[in-house]
Image (cartoon, rainbow, N blue to C red):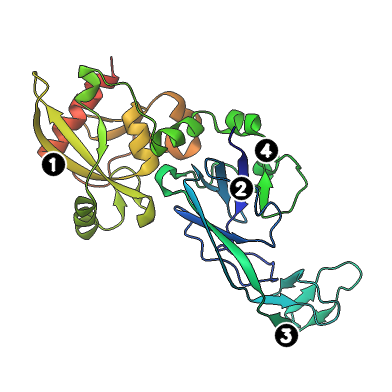
Amino acid sequence: MANYWLLLSASGTGKYAGHTGYADEVASTYQWDETVAHATSVAVGDVVLIRDGEGLLGISVIDSISEWHDYKLTLRCPVCNTPKLTFRTRKVPRYRCTRPSCRSEFEEPVTGTPIVRKFASEHGAGWLPLPGLMDRAELQKLCVARLSIQSMRPLVPERVEHALGGFVEQMFRLHGGKVQDTALRRSARVRTAPAEERQRLLDRFGSTCLFVGTSPRATLDAAALSRFDAAGESKSKDFALLRRDVRSLLDLGQLTVEPECDRIVVRGEARDFRPYIELDGAPLQLPLSSGQREWFGQHWRLHSV
């Protein structure tokens, strides 16, 4: 059975100053080293919820983990040698030791470059961005140890699935789950387009999702909108730049476009979540081509039954 983890992205802002962070690209990779609690417990197939200092950024499942040895720049208290430091932007001295028995303040920490075992996960295939869906306090309630301050925290799977509802299922669908095809559904499925088509759309429209507007490039896919005739043969294909969670919800029919006015309609479980309910009734961010309009008409009829 897969384990569930809450991971703190070190690429965000924070006060901890015991090391200089990691090169996280939140939507695709997460890095840590052997000095972190649970460093060797995280495994391929585990579900990860990634957060910053404010709250949830997104969820995914780990596809692979690579490891290597490298130098790590560490910063320590010159009095007690602990790495438990905070960096202060408005006070001097800039650094403060947080060890209760020390609490020293100083301008420059002691630096070191030990060789450590490092790890990097790859989880881009199933990445489902959910920024702002849960705040820091809400995420804390999902942890096995609710008062833990570790950057990698084990979660209670049942709590996660209760809190996130269908988003966990949607994440697994993004990762590789398949929907059983029928002739009707086949006419309005959302498929992934080739990489060159994605680049063409990015060059033309920038990092603009058709539904939600400007988004990080790493979260955007080119969706192939294929249309079929009555015999089930492909007529033609159009493309649209969609954020991955939008693509998944579109395929489920929880996001549709009303043909008469090109406005977004939110259905089903997606209506239980603020980031999506705010899209209900909103206009699309880009004009539709005639081919796209025909596809969205098919999609509307399929999911209005």
Q: CA distance from mark 4 to mark 2?
A: 17 Å
Front position among marks 1 and 3: 3
Q: Describe residue 131's horizontal placement relative to residue 174 as left or right.
A: right
Q: CA distance from mark 1 to mark 2?
A: 45 Å
Q: CA distance from mark 3 to mark 2?
A: 34 Å
Question: Pointer 1: residues within 10 angstroms few (<14), some, or many (20+)?
Answer: few
Looking at the rendering, which quadrant does residue 127 occupy? top left
* Residue 27 in view here: yes
Question: As shown in the figure, which amino acid type bears the numbered disc 2?
Answer: Val
> Which residue does the numbered mark 4 point to in the structure image?
142
Q: Disc count in the image?
A: 4
Front position among marks 1 and 2: 2
Question: As shown in the figure, which amino acid type bears the numbered disc 3?
Answer: Glu
- Dot 4 and dot 2 residues touching (CB under 8 Å): no
Q: CA distance from mark 1 to mark 3?
A: 59 Å
Q: Describe residue 112's horizontal placement relative to residue 77 as left or right.
A: left
- Dot 1 and dot 2 residues touching (CB under 8 Å): no
Dot 1 falls on a residue whose secondary structure is loop
Dot 3 falls on a residue whose secondary structure is loop
- Name which of mark 1 and mark 2 comes first in the sequence: 2
Q: CA distance from mark 3 to mark 4?
A: 37 Å
